[in-house]
């Protein structure tokens, strides 16, 4: 306790310099934490993937459709428990800036495959019984102030025109990793409309979702499904849900690399700031260290004082930065909920913040400590007074 008091007193001997250094460390830790959370948010869909779900799409590209008739053949594959299907709808609400993920799906099987979308029983029944009914994530409904029973017009891009839906319920995520900004409606509603307006686009799906009995069957089922449609006019590519989501992440790999590099640069900047402070502090106290040596203190005690002071400064800034990260992340999540539907600060990010602060403290104190230990007593005493 006495040593801690000495370290705190030494750290704040020059209050202005120490305060500015702590402020710089706090801002850097805040930035580092947010950037790491952005990377985590990018992989949120991957982390939330189920080992018992497979995605089947057109082997050429996901933008090419598959025949609806494939569903019956897929059901016959050994190990397949449930089959659902759907299309990316690609519409927006009133204005183009109000864009969000919206899908038309086969509702019964889809809700069975995604139990992490928690929907009240009465809302589920209302949705299933209304061909024009839809469900939306809690965050999406809150953003646009939708209430159950509201009419929601969406303007189609892939499927032109104004499409009207009735909100029958809002779902919540089973845990914090679940996206609550999605919008679902009946695939039959789209298909029946296309039969009247664009018959050539009817009875086609964008993807199939396959539920397997056990995770260890995923590879065999994937191979069997793709072999079944080999050499057909619409060959398939079946992969785990995790691999499917990783494919989308890979498209933005360059952006993620830049973010990770910037986060490392921030750590280097923190190190430079703290090292400069410790260098000035040590230079000012060379006389004090010389006197300590004449009293019998060795290099170990001097090292503890300098390193301890560096730790006090960096950890104080780190704690302030971590405390600031939570409210800033909350604001960030609210403003960019559509882009980053899952934006939670993980315990791993907090550990990285603390680890970075400790590494910076040691690195910044290394050269000043070495200089203080090697200074000769006579040379140090010349600077006293």
Image (cartoon, rainbow, N blue to C red):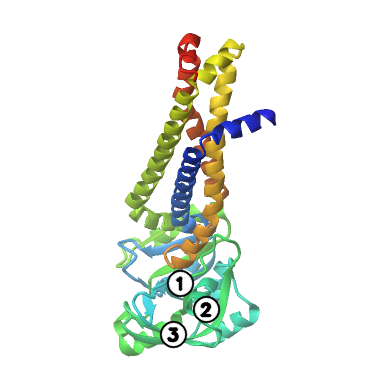
Task: Specify which label sits upstream in the sequence, 2 or 1.
Answer: 1
Which residue position is annotated with label 2? 135
For mark 2, does the 10 Å Cα neighbourhood hold few (<14), some (14 to 19), or many (20 or more) residues?
A: many
Task: Provide the secondary structure element on which disc 2 rests.
Answer: strand
Q: Position of residue 203 (x, y in %)?
A: 38, 79
Q: List the residue tagged with mark 3.
A: 189
Q: How crowded is mark 3: few (under 14 residues within 10 Å), some or many (20 or more)?
A: some
Query: Residue at the spot x=55%, y=48% of the render?
Result: 320
Q: Do the residues labelled 3 and 2 touch (CB within 8 Å)?
A: no
Q: Residue at x 34, y 90 (%)?
A: 196
- Whether residue 198 is visible to the viewer of this picture, yes or no, is yes
Residue 170 tag number = none
- Under circle 3, the secondary element is helix
Identify which residue, 187 or 25, lies in the foreground: 25
The residue positioned farthest toward the right in the image shown: 1
User: In front here: 352 or 12?
Assistant: 12
Q: Is residue 356 or residue 157 the one in the foreground?
A: 356
Residue 204 in sight in this render? no
Q: Distance between the residues labelled 3 and 1?
A: 14 Å
Q: Position of residue 15 (x, y in %)?
A: 52, 39
Question: On screen, 96 above or below 10?
Answer: below
Q: Is residue 280 left or right of residue 173?
A: left
User: Residue 85 — which label?
Assistant: 1
Left or right, 87 with reference to 124? left
């Amino acid at each position: 306790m006495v040593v801690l008091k000495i370290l705190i007193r030494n750290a704040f001997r020059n209050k202005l310099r120490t305060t500015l250094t702590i402020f710089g460390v706090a801002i850097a830790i805040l930035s580092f934490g947010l950037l790491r959370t952005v990377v985590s948010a990018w992989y949120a869909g991957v982390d939330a993937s189920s080992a018992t779900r497979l995605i089947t799409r057109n082997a050429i590209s996901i933008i090419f459709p598959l025949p609806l008739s494939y569903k019956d053949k897929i059901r016959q594959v050994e190990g397949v428990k449930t089959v659902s299907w759907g299309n990316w709808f690609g519409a927006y609400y009133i204005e183009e800036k109000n864009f969000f993920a919206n899908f038309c799906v086969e509702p019964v099987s889809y809700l069975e495959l995604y139990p992490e979308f928690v929907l009240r029983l009465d809302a589920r029944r209302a949705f299933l019984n209304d061909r024009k009914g839809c469900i939306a994530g809690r965050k999406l409904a809150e953003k646009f102030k939708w209430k159950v029973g509201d009419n929601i017009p969406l303007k189609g891009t892939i499927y032109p025109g104004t499409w009207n839906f009735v909100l029958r319920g809002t779902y919540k995520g089973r845990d914090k990793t679940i996206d609550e900004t999605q919008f679902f409606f009946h695939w039959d509603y789209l298909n029946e409309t296309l039969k009247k307006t664009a018959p050539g686009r009817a009875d086609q799906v964008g993807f199939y979702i396959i539920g397997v009995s056990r995770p260890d069957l995923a590879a065999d089922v994937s191979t069997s499904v793709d072999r079944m449609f080999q050499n057909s006019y619409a060959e398939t590519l079946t992969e785990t849900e995790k691999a499917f989501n990783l494919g989308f992440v890979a498209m933005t790999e360059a952006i993620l690399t830049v973010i990770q590099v910037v986060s490392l640069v921030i750590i280097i900047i923190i190190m430079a700031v703290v090292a400069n402070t410790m260098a000035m502090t040590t230079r000012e106290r060379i006389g004090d260290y010389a006197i300590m040596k004449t009293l019998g203190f060795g290099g170990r005690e001097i090292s503890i004082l300098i390193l301890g002071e560096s730790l006090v400064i960096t950890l104080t800034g780190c704690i302030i930065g971590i405390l600031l990260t939570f409210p800033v992340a909350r604001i960030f999540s609210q403003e960019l909920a559509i882009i980053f539907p899952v934006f939670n600060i993980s315990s791993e990010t907090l550990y990285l913040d603390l680890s970075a602060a400790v590494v910076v403290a040691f690195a910044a104190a290394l050269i000043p400590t070495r200089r203080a230990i090697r200074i000769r007593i006579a040379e140090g005493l010349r600077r006293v007074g």
